[in-house]
Image (cartoon, rainbow, N blue to C red):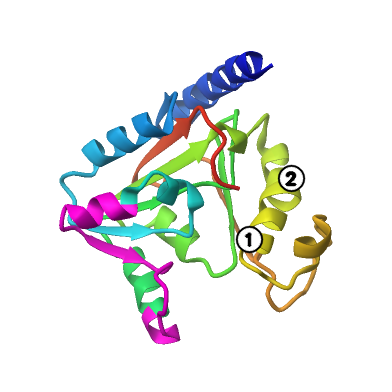
Amino acid sequence: MEEHRDWLMERWAEKAVANLKKHDFDAVFVQTAAEARERILAMVEPYDSFGFGGSDTVRALGLVEALREKGKTVYDHWQAGLSKEADLEIRLQQGRSDCFLCSANAVSLTGEVVNVDGIGNRTAAMSFGPRKVIVAAGVNKLTPDLPSALRRVKEVAAPMRARSLGMKTPCAETGICSDCSAPQRICRITTILERRPLLTDMTIILIGRSMGF
């Protein structure tokens, strides 16, 4: 069963990479998280400052620690004990860093990258600001087309993410999106990258494993 699932996900990833390239993204598929980590660290060597979106995937790759060990400047708002002011300043600096690393909520086989944010520091930095943007996503983020990518965000990614953050939203309790108006709603900003943003060098790395939400 697992062998056939891996085969199917690799075929999907190959199709997604081909269409992402048609849409002017740099895109690649790697089999393992270790390969993704090695490729990313080699790719970002020329840069000095790094912003990190709220991504379990890039943190699972150990990139925050690896870059700090290299003496790089890292803007990561997931540090414990930050004041509200410090958190805001870090989020602002993410969009001004040399390189921004994040994941995606969904990547369609037709070549679109979909993200939904509550605050917007990730979606803003992905679109414009950093000299380089790297999006690392597991094959669990792949969907057949754009409509299914948008559905994945609301039906799969958002409920799990809201629950992981301890948010008081209906989906964090029921697992079902109700298009709520809860004060802690995390689905507030939706971006669809249909093509590579004109002034942003962006690489999409698809990883042959289930990673993140």
Q: For this rendering, which residue is in front, 201 or 41?
A: 41
**Which amino acid, by three-letter code, is at mark 2?**
Arg
Span of residues in magenta: 64-86
Q: Secondary structure at mark 1?
A: helix
In this figure, which residue is indicated by the disc labeled 1? Answer: 164
| Residue 79 included in the magenta stretch of the image | yes
Residue 17 shows in this picture: yes
Q: Is residue 180 magenta?
A: no
**Label 2 packing within 10 angstroms: few (<14), some (14-19), many (20+):** some
Task: Identify the residue at image location x=39%, y=70%.
Answer: 79
Taking the spot 41% from the left edge, 85% from the top edge, the residue there is: 83
Q: Is residue 154 above or below residue 44?
A: below
Identify which residue, 16 or 61, lies in the foreground: 61
Residue 65 position by quadrant: bottom left
**Image quarter for residue 149?**
top right
* Cα–Cα gap, marks 1 and 2: 19 Å
Residue where numbered disc 2 is placed: 151
- The answer to whether residue 25 is above or below residue 103 is above
Label 1: how many residues lie within 10 Å, few (<14), some (14-19) or many (20+)? few
- Foreground residue, 97 or 165? 165
Q: Would you say 33 lies left or right of 42 here? A: right
Does residue 25 appear left or right of residue 48 in this picture? right
Amino acid on which the number 1 mark rests in the picture: Ser
